[in-house]
Image (tube, rainbow, N blue to C red):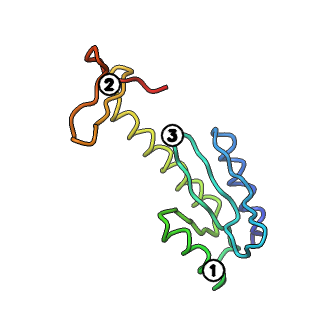
């Protein structure tokens, strides 16, 4: 049976080699926080909790995870490095696709509050910096 730290290490190596960060998450004075804060390319971000195969989060962890979810943050729980990697890659791919959908010919198309195309004074769309 794989240890939790082996699963975590495999995932962290994948994230870092693909250009992301998988920061060890520690919050002094708070217990049961997720193991990592993942910051991937294209704005992908989520918390992740690693468990041994077949294990579930403790009640205290579930309560803490739900605190983040109620505030709109994603908290994933996994007992498989392969599953975590598939989810991460899927989220990055989806974010990249959304970025491409907003761009045309290297220029970004954006919408303002009224739903109109938002352009520069000369009529050209703004670019991503």
Q: In this picture, is 121 found above or below 87? A: above
Image marks 2 and 1: residues in contact by CB distance under 8 Å: no
- Circle 1 residue: 56
Q: In this picture, is 73 found above or below 44? A: below
Please tell me whether mark 1 or mark 3 is closer to you in this view: 3
Q: In this picture, is 118 found above or below 120? A: below
Secondary structure beneath dot 1 equals loop
Spatial CA distance of label 2 from label 1 is: 45 Å
Residue visible at 21% across and 35% down in the picture: 116
Q: Earlier in the sequence, mark 1 or mark 3?
A: 3
**Residue 14, labelled with which disc?**
none
Q: Position of residue 64 (x, y in %)?
A: 62, 76
Spatial CA distance of label 1 from label 3 is: 30 Å
Q: Position of residue 91 (x, y in %)?
A: 48, 50
Quadrant in which the N terminus appears: bottom right
- Circle 2 residue: 104
Q: Is residue 67 left or right of residue 19?
A: left
Secondary structure beneath dot 3 equals helix
Q: Position of residue 54 (x, y in %)?
A: 64, 79
- Circle 3 residue: 42
Q: Is residue 52 left or right of residue 100?
A: right
């Amino acid at each position: 049976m794989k240890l939790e730290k082996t699963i975590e290490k495999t995932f962290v190596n994948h994230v870092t080699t693909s250009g992301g960060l998988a920061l060890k998450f520690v919050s002094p004075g708070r217990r049961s926080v997720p193991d990592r804060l993942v910051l991937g390319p294209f704005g992908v971000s989520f918390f992740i909790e690693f468990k041994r195969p077949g294990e579930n989060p403790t009640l205290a962890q579930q309560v803490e995870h739900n605190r983040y979810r109620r505030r709109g943050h994603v908290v994933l729980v996994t007992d498989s490095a392969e599953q975590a990697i598939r989810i991460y890659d899927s989220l990055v791919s989806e974010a990249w696709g959304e970025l491409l959908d907003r761009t045309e010919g290297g220029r970004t198309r954006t919408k303002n509050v009224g739903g109109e195309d938002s352009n520069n004074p000369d009529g050209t769309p703004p670019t991503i910096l």
